[in-house]
Image (cartoon, helix red, strand yellow):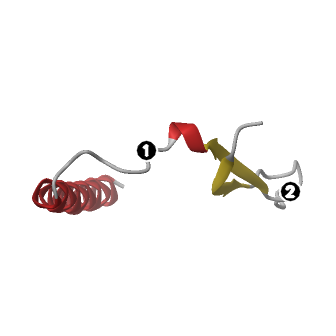
């Protein structure tokens, strides 16, 4: 049997709009990379890059929301 880890929860809505019981979402441990082959400097650069991307994505989404509000 494969080892699994819980990576989240999923809750769907019932026809009346209430939430059904939450169902855990699992992923096989073999699918999860436990250790990267990057140096610490490379790992830090990658984390910084991902952080910058997340900020830019949020800014883009905020601008998109503002444009939609102006059209309404």
Q: Above or below — where is 5 with respect to 59?
A: above
Q: Which one is earlier in the sequence, the residue at label 1 or at label 2?
A: 2
Label 1: how many residues lie within 10 Å, few (<14), some (14-19) or many (20+)?
few
* Quadrant of res 20: bottom right
Residue 57 falls left or right of residue 6: left
Picture residue at 32% right of the left edge, 58% below the top: 65
How many numbered circles does the render carry?
2
Residue 71 falls left or right of residue 9: left
Residue 33 marker = 1
* Quadrant of res 55: bottom left
* Quadrant of res 9: bottom right
Residue 29 falls left or right of residue 34: right
- Nearer the camera: disc 1 or disc 2: 1
Residue 62 marker = none
Q: Above or below — where is 36 with respect to 62?
A: above
Picture residue at 24% right of the left edge, 54% below the top: 57
User: What percent of the width, then of the height, locates residue 11?
Assistant: 75, 55
Marks 1 and 2 close (CB-CB < 8 Å): no
* Residue identified by numbered label 2: 20
User: What percent of the width, then of the height, locates residue 32?
Assistant: 49, 44
User: How far apart in space, not on screen, are marks 1 and 2 (Cα)?
Assistant: 32 Å
Residue 29 falls left or right of residue 38: right
User: What percent of the width, then of the height, locates residue 23?
Assistant: 79, 53
User: What percent of the width, then of the height, locates residue 41?
Assistant: 10, 60
Quarter holding the C terminus is: bottom left
Looking at this view, is 36 or 17 the one in front?
Answer: 36
Identify the secondary structure beneath mark 2: loop
Q: Above or below — where is 26 with respect to 58?
A: above
Identify the secondary structure beneath mark 1: loop
Label 2: how many residues lie within 10 Å, few (<14), some (14-19) or many (20+)?
few
Quarter holding the N terminus is: top right
Looking at this view, is 72 or 34 the one in front?
Answer: 34
């Amino acid at each position: 049997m494969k080892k699994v880890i819980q990576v989240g929860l999923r809750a769907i809505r019932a026809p009346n709009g209430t939430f059904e019981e939450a169902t855990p979402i699992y992923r096989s441990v073999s699918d999860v990379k436990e250790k990267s082959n990057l140096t610490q400097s490379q790992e830090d650069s990658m984390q910084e890059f991902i952080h910058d991307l997340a900020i830019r994505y949020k800014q883009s989404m905020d601008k998109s929301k503002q444009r939609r509000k102006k059209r309404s």
